[in-house]
Image: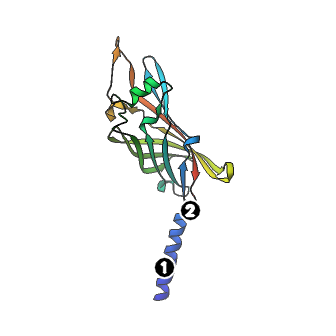
Amino acid sequence: MKTSLLLLTIVALAAGLTNVRADETYKIDPVHSSITFKVRHFFSYVEGNFRKFEGIIIFNAERPEKSSVTAKIETASVDTGNEKRDEDLRSADFFDAAKFPTITFKSKSVKRTGENTGDIVGDLTMHGVTREVTLHGKFLGKGQGMGGKQISGWQLTLAEPIKRSDYGLNWSKTVEGTAVVGHDVTVTIDAEADKVPNE
């Protein structure tokens, strides 16, 4: 009886260790990554990005549904290449960065859709509002980078544009019937992430 119990314990521990090894943790490298967005301005589009952000990707190649993603963006780091416009975006008319300093994403499920693709469903919190969104993810590969570090590459796009009014970013103005700023915002994330050594 004691022998059987010991064997079961060893098997359980071995299974646990296997699961730990299957998970690879990667920390997003902001120097080699970007979070960009595009929104209509009158008859054309303006692009911007965020300069300060962080994120963790836990990747399980054998069971992708066990993978997860978390990320945090500093709202005040918005950059469209025009300081006056960026000040407007940081103001209470838009992001209200003083009151809502971060935008966060936390995944709830991952579903494999192809050999190197998957859909990531999670909660996006911005401007004090949390809504569920879907990201189309593409795994670009992994291997040794500069200095011997193990790195990985990813691309993420929102399945549908963000409607800024859904998050309380309601500022709106028209000139001769044409909206100054569009309501739909597309987002693309290109991420290079460094592998975190197993403890």
**Vertical placement of 23 versus 36: above or below?**
below
User: Quick one: which residue is furthest to the top in this view?
Assistant: 176
Q: Mark 1 and mark 2: span between their CA atoms?
A: 25 Å
Q: Marks 2 and 1: in contact by CB < 8 Å?
A: no
Q: Is residue 160 found left or right of 10 in the rendered image?
A: left
Q: Is residue 41 left or right of residue 99?
A: right
Which of the two residues, 148 or 13, is positioned nearer the viewer here?
Answer: 148
The disc label shown at residue 44, or none: none
Residue 131 placed where, x, y %?
34, 41
- Going 55% across and 52% down the picture, which residue do you hit? 26
Residue placed at 46% from the left, 37% from the top?
Answer: 158
Task: Say which of marks 1 and 2 sits in front.
Answer: 2
| Upstream in sequence: badge 1 or badge 2 | 1
Name the residue carrying label 2: 198
Instruction: Name the residue carrying label 1.
Output: 8
Residue 141 in the image: state x and y as whole percent: 62, 47
